[in-house]
Amino acid sequence: QVQLVESGGGLVQAGGSLRLSCVASGGIFSINTMAWYRQAPGNRRDLVAQITSGGTLNYADSVKGRFTISRDYGKNTVYLQMNSLKPEDTAVYYCNVLGSGSRGVFNYWGQGTQVTVSS
């Protein structure tokens, strides 16, 4: 059973920085895409940043130039470095992993970590 463990959320003032981490474990053969999504109250869950197995990056326009996604392939870990945070970045951030494992192809979500940016 694949498990995702997220960490790094918290409360920060506008202009500050946070770094999120997500570790995937449990019967994994390979990982294709690792990504971060976020969901604010009353809103849908939207893609923030994505990194493929080949290193292709994709960012939401609202975070370009401020957020950086990176990946440790050996540790099945994805990071999201968030700089110049704004109050509108406040949301629950979710890790998402697509890959294959002992039970076949999988698409898993982390439990979510709260990021709150005060003005």
Image (spheres, rainbow, N blue to C red):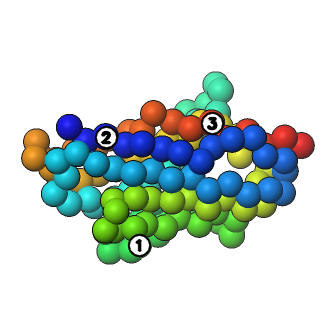
Q: Could you tell me residue 30's position as x and y percent? A: 20, 60
Mark 1 burial class by Cα count in 10 Å: few <14, some 14-19, many 20+: few
Q: Quadrant of the N terminus?
A: top left
Amino acid on which disc 3 is placed: Gln
- Labelled disc at residue 56: 1
Residue located 89% across and 43% down the image: 119
Residue sitting nearer the eye, 110 or 40: 110
Q: Earlier in the sequence, mark 2 or mark 3?
A: 2
For label 2, the SS is strand
Between marks 3 and 1, how big is the CA–CA gap? 26 Å
Residue ID for mark 2: 3
Q: Secondary structure at mark 3?
A: strand
Instruction: Where is residue 101? Give x, y as percent.
Output: 15, 50
Amino acid carrying label 1: it is: Thr
Name the amino acid, label 2: Gln
Looking at the image, residue 45 lies above or below residue 76: above
Which residue in the protein does label 3 denote?
A: 114
**Left or right: 82 in relation to 31:** right
Position of residue 18 measured from the top left corner of the image (x, y, whole percent):
68, 54
Res. 98 visible in picture: yes
Residue 23 is marked as: none
Residue 62 seen in render: no
Q: Earlier in the sequence, mark 2 or mark 1?
A: 2
96 vs 64: above or below: above
Residue mark closest to the camera, 3 vs 1: 3
Task: Between label 2 and label 1, give the one nearer the viewer.
Answer: 2
Rate crowding at label 3 as few (under 14), some (14 to 19) or many (20 or more) other CA atoms within 10 Å.
some
Secondary-structure class at tag 1: loop
Residue 104 at what x, y percent from top left?
A: 11, 46
